[in-house]
Amino acid sequence: WAIFAPYVIEINRLKKERNAVILAHNYMTPEIYHGVADFVGDSLQLAIKATEVENDVIVQCGVHFMAETSKILNPSKKVLIPDLKAGCSLAESITAEGVAEMRAKYPGAPVVSYVNTTAEVKAASDICCTSANALQIVEAMEGDTVIMTPDQFLAQNVAALSTKNIVWWAGSCIVHELYTAEDIRAYREFEPDTMVIAHPECTPSVVAEADFTGSTSGIVDWIHKNKPAKAMLVTECSMAANIADELPEVEFAKPCNMCPFMKKITLEKILWSLYNMEHEVVVDPEVAAKARLAVERMIDLSK
Ligand code: 13P
Ligand code: SF4
């Protein structure tokens, strides 16, 4: 922590000077999560929080689609992202043309797009969802068939629980798709009492091995509530790192697949971002207005 202290002190000072707030995703490294974030959460919580911010500036410590969502929901604020290369394999997997292709293939079916998408894709969709509310949103759609984009595994995991006929786009998360059911079973042969907690971006065979599946904040809450003696978080590396200190009674197996996009955000870059007031995230107002409808519909249905 000593090496981080000068950055933490200066970032927290500059936040006050710029009247800025730091909204950070659960996958940020511990020095960001514990040291400089004003609010931490999953994608849904970050989106809801963005609507409530009264400060002049939001520094989004997460990936680009999260910063875009904040700008879409609170357009009068200056939204900064410390590194423009903080993308997402899901957001990159589909364009608005892809949504149009799905609509042509399944006429009349509503399009539910994961928030892990660009503003243009959100604007072309009927409603958004996150890993915290995907089933609830899909179930609320009219008609039998629902199009889910762009995460094929989230869609398949929802389909297993849904009454709807779900069709999907073939995108995936490069972090979660790497986990396999075989690896989990092999680990459990040696540590049979380990509780396996998975994110729904994992494949259905991994989810079938899990004792609990939920959004990143769902995972944090579950661990705090159940305090298992041994737990394996089948998700991005920083999750276990961020909560392990708060729960010394839980022994964490730490399988580690790192999100290279989330890890673009560092303390140094946050300081640079606040100092130079860059990189500002801008969304075309017409696109933003349509995308806002899709995100707000989701937030309304999640209440
Ligand atoms: P959550 O909404 O569960 O935080 O997930 C976001 C994400 O990018 C997971 O890979
Ligand atoms: Fe995207 Fe996967 Fe990284 Fe989340 S973990 S930001 S879904 S690439």
Image: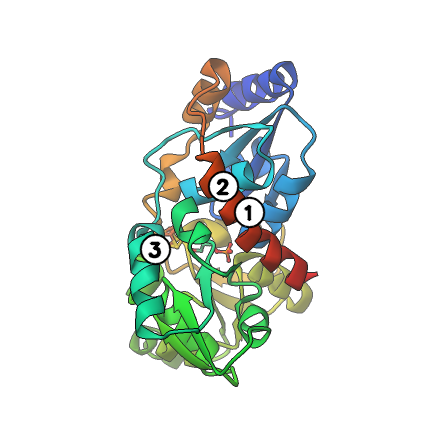
Q: Are marks 1 and 3 in contact (CB under 8 Å)?
A: no
Residue 246 picture location, percent across and down:
63, 50
Q: Is residue 171 left or right of residue 155?
A: left
Q: Which residue is mark 3?
A: 90
Question: Under tag 2, what secondary structure?
Answer: helix
Answer yes or no: disc 1 within 8 Å of ligand 1: no
Q: Is residue 26 visible?
A: no
Mark 2 surroundings within 10 Å by alpha-carbon count, few (fewer than 14), some (14 through 19), many (20 or more):
many
Q: Nearer the viewer, residue 228 or 95?
A: 95
- Of the 4 image quadrants, the one containing the C terminus is bottom right
Q: Is residue 51 visible?
A: yes
- The kind of residue tagged 2 is Ala
Mark 3 surroundings within 10 Å by alpha-carbon count, few (fewer than 14), some (14 through 19), many (20 or more):
many
Q: Which residue is mark 1?
A: 292
Answer yes or no: disc 3 within 8 Å of ligand 2: yes
Residue 155 picture location, percent across and down:
41, 72
Q: Identify the disc placed on residue 75.
A: none
- The kind of residue tagged 3 is Leu
